Amino acid sequence: MKLNLNQKLAEVQANLKAKKSRYNGFGKYNYRAAEDILEAIKPFLLEHKVTVTISEEMLSFDPPVMKSTATILDGESKDAIHTCAIVGVDLMSKGMSMPQKYGAASSYGKKYALGNLLLIDDTADADASNDHSGKTAKVTLTSKKDPLFAKAIKFVSEGGAVSAIAGKYDLSKEIKKALEDAQPMKTETL
């Protein structure tokens, strides 16, 4: 029986396993990058006679906003399904050159466009980082002058989750809001 593109995509979505092969030392967790997703999808491409591509375009230059589009194309019917992710480029991020800032936004956009297409959920179990040992109290982060705040802002602006920081540190309302404001934009498609 010949499958249509929706059926092929459903099979890929149901069977794809994209490992979290990267490690974030600040947040102390594993995560996946766009490259991990692309590597995981390769075995399905020939089997289902489909291709997956990612394209990018600048939507705005002031402020810089990028759109990443992930597409699955059926080689038999030429049908296509597209999903998008919209991300901002954080020009205020310290410690990165301009190409690195755009590259970080590009990587983030590609990852989320692919995640939208392939139904990869990047949320973490809130209990996953809790060892229930009660051995150490959380460090409190209440000042923007604290060196940890600079690390936290960098982490979040590069796509890290505020919840990962909140799991490790007690955050004041002001610090939590500043971290949330530093997160790149992301969108979800239906």
Image (cartoon, rainbow, N blue to C red):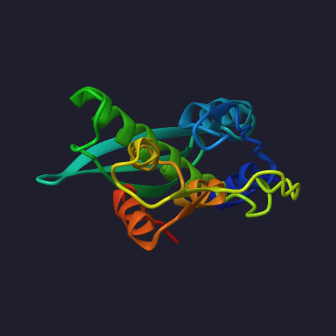
- Left or right of 75 on screen, residue 46: right
- Left or right of 12 on screen, residue 144: left
Specify the quadrant of the image occupied by residue 46.
top right
Residue 84: image location, x then y, percent = 42, 57
The outermost residue toward the right is 133
Residue 96: image location, x then y, percent = 30, 29
- Left or right of 153 on screen, residue 75: right
Residue 71: image location, x then y, percent = 48, 48
Q: Residue at x 67, y 37 (%)?
A: 41
Specify the quadrant of the image occupied by residue 101.
top left
Is any atom of residue 78 visible in this view?
no
* On screen, residue 96 above or below 63: above
- Depth order, front residue of 43/26: 26
- Depth order, front residue of 74/115: 115
Q: Residue at x 81, y 48 (%)?
A: 15
Q: Could you tell me how many numbered marks the image carries?
A: 0
- Depth order, front residue of 64/15: 64
- Depth order, front residue of 172/78: 172
Is any atom of residue 116 visible in this view?
yes
The outermost residue toward the left is 62
Q: Residue at x 22, y 44 (%)?
A: 92
Residue 16: image location, x then y, percent = 76, 45
